Image (cartoon, coloured by chain):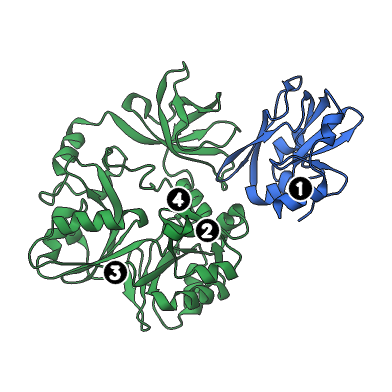
Chain colours: A blue, B green
Amino acid sequence: MNVPSDLRYNSSHEWVRLEGDIATVGISDHAQEELTDVVFVELPLVGRAVDAGDPTAVVESVKAASDIYAPIGGEVVEVNLDVEADPALVNTDPYGRGWIFKLRVKNAADVEALLDAAAYSAQIG
Amino acid sequence: MSDLLKRSPLEAAHVELGARLVPFAGWYMPVQYTSILDEHAAVRGAAGIFDISHMGQFLVSGPGSLEWLNRTLANNVAKLGIGEGQYTFLLNENGGVIDDLIAYRTGEADFFLVVNASMIDEDFAWMSKHLDAGVELRNESDAWVGMAIQGPDSPAVYAAACPGEPLPPRNGIAFTSSGCVVCRTGYTGEDGFEFFSPAADGGDWLKRFVQHGAKPCGLGSRDSLRLEMCYPLNGNDLSPTRTPIEAGLGFFVDLEKGDFVGRETLAKQKAEGTEVRLVALAYTDKGAPPRAHYPVLSPEGEVLGELSSGVLSPSLGIGIGLAYLPIAWTKLGTEVRIDVRGRLNPAKVVKKPFYKPAAKA
């Protein structure tokens, strides 16, 4: 299972890449494999303010809809229209072209409180 | 939890083939092997194989079995020649559907019934309670393992796996020289067959069909395939409070054959019409996948009903679903909205089925 060491993770399987005060969010390789073929991604509205733990996007497989939670608080500043057009990117490139939304974080230190790759790897065992 | 679930005799073979197993209808069954979309496409374009061991098999025999079945089931078994089968219903006194099943005639007074997994016990109890003297009813569900080979290439898979054995014609049943039962039917709209072997031989047969080109497929694609064809799923699209007439399946009911359980309600509905009817709804644009229980609204926002089944059709790329709607909303082309988490997706009533398979051999 691919768990890049330069990212932080939420126990609900989102990953976060922090660059300045912008956090890019997607779902982990483990999550995309568990969800199976992604056929639809519902993106949040740009400008929406979210708290950590808020359902912010929805990723749907043939069988089920799954909420994607904001790992940290902030404002949605960009969404990935490519995954809206081609949802399979979430399966094929979960840490790259399959990202879902970007947040301008309220408090960059919140990211430090998330799981590191070792802790997340241990969680998914 | 899984201790309470029935296990397919094919479980070891599934694990070997990489299946993801989930609880379904009281059974622990493969939902997919590699990808629901790939498995769906394999059945539409080549051949796939499904474990249907969870389905039940009843044998009915003895003098008077035809007459008894005709009073117990909604279709007319007298229309069946030996070796032929038909889709039919087990109804309650109000005409509601207990189960939908296929009845095959295997002799003058011998019948083979294939019923739904979750309904084996209930069907058997109901039929036993209404049994006529002289008719023998046996539940052989545990003795058989079943698999469905589906897709345009399935006759070729059969020819390679069972050389020299003829495949019966559409809806027909045959017995193989190795003691198996083969039925030319399925739940996908494609050509194909269901194959029942003694439980102990199931794993070997599964591997044999796979070796000859059938891709292992799980219940996930079985559901998307059947819904593209508008084939009902009992428990979703059929229920004890809905009749086959309301479900739009009156073709499989014979009101002229004499009395049968539920006939009175069906005859009245046929003559006077019904208040609701099960319709096929398709999105007119892209949108989040429709799913069972999502509300169906009028364009003005009045709640009309809910989806009994829904899926983002892998073959068509749009949302499709079935819903019981008031009769005024069932005309082809009628515009409605499907409520997905508060977002109202425009949809319209379309002709069944959603998908038309390529011409059959």
Image point (46%, 17%), residue name: B301
- For the residues beneath circles 1 and 2, the answer to whether they share a chain is no
Q: Which residue is mark 3?
A: B140
For mark 4, give the secondary structure: helix
10 Å neighbourhood of mark 2: few (<14), some, or many (≥20)? many
Q: Which residue is mark 2?
A: B218
Q: CA distance from mark 3 to mark 4?
A: 26 Å
For mark 1, give the secondary structure: helix
N-term mark: 3 or 4: 3
Label 1 or label 4, whichever lies nearer to me, is 1
Q: Which residue is mark 1?
A: A120
Q: Amino acid at mark 2?
A: Gly
Label 3 or label 1, whichever lies nearer to me, is 1
Label 4 or label 2, whichever lies nearer to me, is 2
N-term mark: 3 or 2: 3
Verify CB contact (< 8 Å) between mark 1 and mark 4.
no
Residue B235, located in which quarter of the rendered image? Answer: top left
Q: Name the outermost residue toward the left.
A: B133
Q: Which residue is mark 4?
A: B226
Above or below, B47 against A22 in this view is below
